[in-house]
Amino acid sequence: MENLENIPMGKIVSFLSHFQYKENKNIYKLPLNVCISKHNDITETDILWTERLIKAHLKYNSLVYHVFYHDRTKEFWILKENSYMDKMMYSFDIDYFNRNKYISLLKSINDCISKNGVILLTVNNLPNQCSLTCHFYDHQENIDKVLQILIKNNIEIFQHTNLGELTQGLMSRKINQTELCSNYTEEHISNILSDICLFPENKI
């Protein structure tokens, strides 16, 4: 387990101390390079420890905010209750055992989502319960573009969850989750599907 030596706590605590007095806003963005000294080989453990430090500081000061690492912008987003985390996300199911057929579709959708939007893949790898779902949220103009693509491909769209609920599911280990970055190619997406899905496709 890595320690916190790569995280300049002073910078984070200084930011968060100032943050306490800005409760009129719903969202704050803390760049990753402000939190972590090293610029290469940043691991998920580095990000997790930083996120825990932010949450601990907020809890100590009795502030109720969500903390979400946004991979597209390389920032920690600190969100007030009833803000971005509570907005309903658009979702559609992907055939877990024929998932590679969706790579081109996922690439097209990802290209429509802006840098400040979110597109997540969540997977359940439990035997006999395997499922894979794509969730997304962005400005309405970009959402409309994605919806047109999905309708054109006869994909059923639904809304039943938000970012807060997805994050809770991740924390409780009910699901595995990954975010698609804005510059991902079809090869990137293919590798991600291979990484997060435990069981092979039907053809294999």
Image (spheres, rainbow, N blue to C red):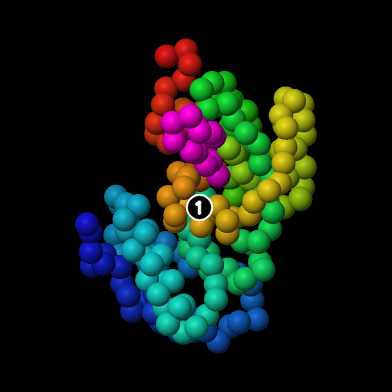
Residue drawn where x is 44% and y is 35% of the image: 125
Quarter of the image where one finds residue 105: top right
Task: Look at the image and say whether residue 46 sits in the magenta stretch.
Answer: no
Comparing 84 with 15, the one in front is 84
| Percent position of residue 30, x then y | 48, 67
- Image position, residue 201 (x, y; %): 46, 20
Q: Is 32 above or below relative to 80?
A: above
Among the 4 quarters of the image, the one containing residue 194 = top left
Q: Is residue 85 left or right of residue 193?
A: right
Residue at position x 40%, y 31% from top? 198
Q: Assign a secondary structure to mark 1.
A: helix
Amino acid identity at mark 1:
Gly
- In this picture, is 9 found above or below 3? below
Q: Quadrant of the C terminus?
A: top left
Q: Is residue 121 magenta?
A: yes
Q: Quadrant of residue 164?
A: bottom right
Q: Could you say where residue 185 lies in the image, as x and y percent from the top left?
A: 51, 32
Residue underneath mark 1 = 169
Residue 88 in sight here = yes
Q: Nearer the viewer, residue 130 or 83?
A: 130
Q: From the viewer's perspective, is 43 left or right of 147? A: left
Q: Which residues are magenta?
A: 120-132
- Asked if residue 101 lies left or right of residue 61, the reply is right
